[in-house]
């Protein structure tokens, strides 16, 4: 019966068949549109999450670089001293880094002026 309905030459049945095919095509296209919409929404949300993760990773990397630089920097303790009647400052390196290019600083104190 279905096969005879597909093969028939009756104009009314041909129009009905074409209408049914058009309706089915429309439903399939509508279903594709709905699936595409939800896929796009899901992909956008995933892209935003990946962007947040990248920002967090970059922030962690920057902090690690900063901490590494701090760990090898020199750190000083300053002690006032009086050697030979002159007031001076004594620097003591307490950091992990090498203190290079440290020069003597000369100046006047209130007692000397």
Image (spheres, helix red, strand yellow):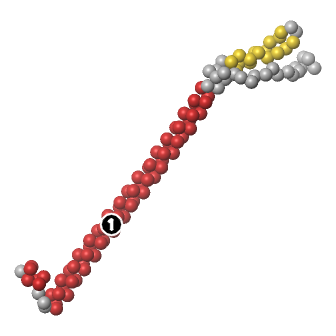
Specify whether 35 is left or right of 9: right
Which secondary structure, mark 1?
helix
Residue at the extreme bottom of the image, as rendered = 11
113 vs 21: above or below: above
Q: Position of residue 75 (x, y in %)?
A: 67, 22
Few, some or many residues within 10 Å of mark 1 (<14, 14–19, 20+): few
Viewer-proximal residue, 4 or 98? 98
Residue drawn 54% across the image and 33% down it: 64
* 99, above or below 8, in the image: above
In the image as oriented, which residue stretches furthest toward the front?
Answer: 101
Identify whether 62 is placed above or below 98.
below
Instruction: Report the number of discs.
Output: 1
Q: On the rendered image, what quadrant is the N terminus found in? A: bottom left
Query: What is the quadrant of residue 108 in the picture?
Result: top right
What x and y, as percent, mark residue 55? Answer: 51, 45
- Residue positioned most to the right: 113
Residue at 71 percent across and 18 percent down: it is: 77
Say left or right for 2 vs 109. left
Q: Position of residue 59 (x, y in %)?
A: 54, 40
Reading the image, the residue beneath label 1 is: 34
Quadrant of residue 72 in the image? top right
Q: Position of residue 81 (x, y in %)?
A: 80, 12
Q: Image quadrant for the C terminus?
A: top right
Left or right of 72, for residue 40: left
- Position of residue 48 in the picture relative to residue 64 (left or right): left
Residue pictured at 64% horizontal, 22% vertical: 97
Q: Residue at the location (87% across, 20% down)? A: 109
In the rendered image, which quarter is residue 4 located in? Answer: bottom left
Residue most extreme to the top:
84
């Amino acid at each position: 019966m279905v096969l005879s309905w597909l093969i028939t030459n009756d104009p009314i049945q041909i129009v009905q068949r074409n209408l049914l095919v058009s309706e089915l095509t429309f439903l399939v296209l509508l279903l594709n549109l709905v699936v595409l919409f939800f896929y796009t929404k899901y992909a956008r949300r995933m892209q935003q999450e990946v962007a947040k993760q990248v920002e967090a990773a970059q922030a962690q990397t920057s902090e690690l670089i900063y901490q590494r630089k701090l760990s090898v920097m020199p750190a000083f303790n300053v002690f006032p001293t009086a050697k030979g009647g002159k007031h001076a400052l004594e620097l003591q390196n307490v950091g992990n880094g090498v203190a290079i290019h440290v020069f003597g600083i000369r100046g006047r104190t209130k007692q000397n002026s």
